[in-house]
Image (tube, grey):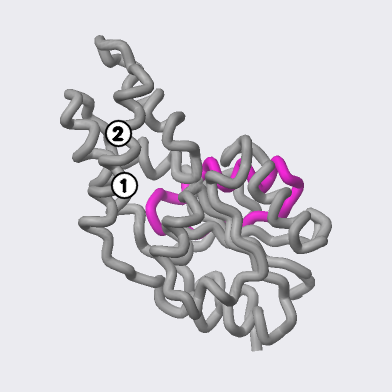
Amino acid sequence: MFSFKAILFDMDGTIVDSMPYHFISWFEVLKKYGVCVRPSTVFEMEGARMNEIIEIAFKDYQEELTSEIRSCIFSQREEIFKKYFQRHIFSGIREFIEKLKNKGTLLGLVSGSFKREVQHMLPKELYDLFDTVIGGDMVKKSKPYPEPYLTAAKNLNVSSEKCLVIENAPYGIKSAKSANMLCYAIATSLPKESLQMADKIFDKHKDLYDYLNLK
């Protein structure tokens, strides 16, 4: 049943168990401005540009959301994330990616995080397994638009129909489906009910590994 030429992975919540740290960093920086953000807001918007998350979080904010405030939030959020972040790679994912590599499958990493963050969050030996890496700062329109996944496919010289996307969040799933790609989702940070746009949903990583049944 395995017939994909390329597999494109999201990073946060798919390869690295990092979503709790993203929530903590957003929560701490926004509370300085009297803004309270819920975990579900951050998890559901994973993959979006930071500007978009700020717009949603500040929708009831009474003061003007100036460019200076945005800039401060960006830098403070990054510092807080670095302060708390501890690298936890999901069990079995590296071995799974290595099996794909050995099988000759082209590999892409497509993240809403800036590329410098991607390089910081992944161990080099895992980062180097990917044939192309697309960060959120490398495209004009980030997830949920199709550009990130289409860019990865173009870099790999593979048609959308030959790509499988592995995701964990609605914005990423919408991005993949808008790019006319098959998308499997893993319920790592959100319930299955939030991932219904995906072609197949798995409770945990092992279920995905077993389903693809790589030898």
Residue 21 sits above or below residue 14 on the image: above
Q: Is residue 119 above or below residue 173?
A: below
Where on the picture, by quarter, is residue 123? bottom left
Q: Nearer the viewer, residue 212 or 157?
A: 157
Q: Position of residue 159 (x, y in %)?
A: 83, 57
Residue at image location 72% in from the left, 49% down from the top: 150
2 sits left or right of 195 in the view? right
Report the residue marked by disc 2.
Answer: 73
Residue at position x 30%, y 33% in the image: 73
Q: Are marks 1 and 2 in contact (CB under 8 Å)?
A: no
**N-term-proximal mark, 1 vs 2:** 2
Q: Residues within 10 Å of mark 2 (few under 14, many from 20)?
A: many
Per the rendered image, the range of residues in magenta is: 170-193
What type is the residue that disc 1 sits on?
Answer: Glu
- The residues bearing labels 1 and 2 have C-alpha atoms spaced at a distance of 8 Å
Drawn side of residue 146 relative to residue 20, left or right: right
Q: Is residue 5 left or right of residue 20?
A: right
Furthest-front residue in view? 68
Q: State the residue at coordinates (51%, 62%).
A: 202
Report the disc number at residue 78: 1
Amino acid of disc 2: Ile
Name the quarter where the C terminus is drawn. bottom right
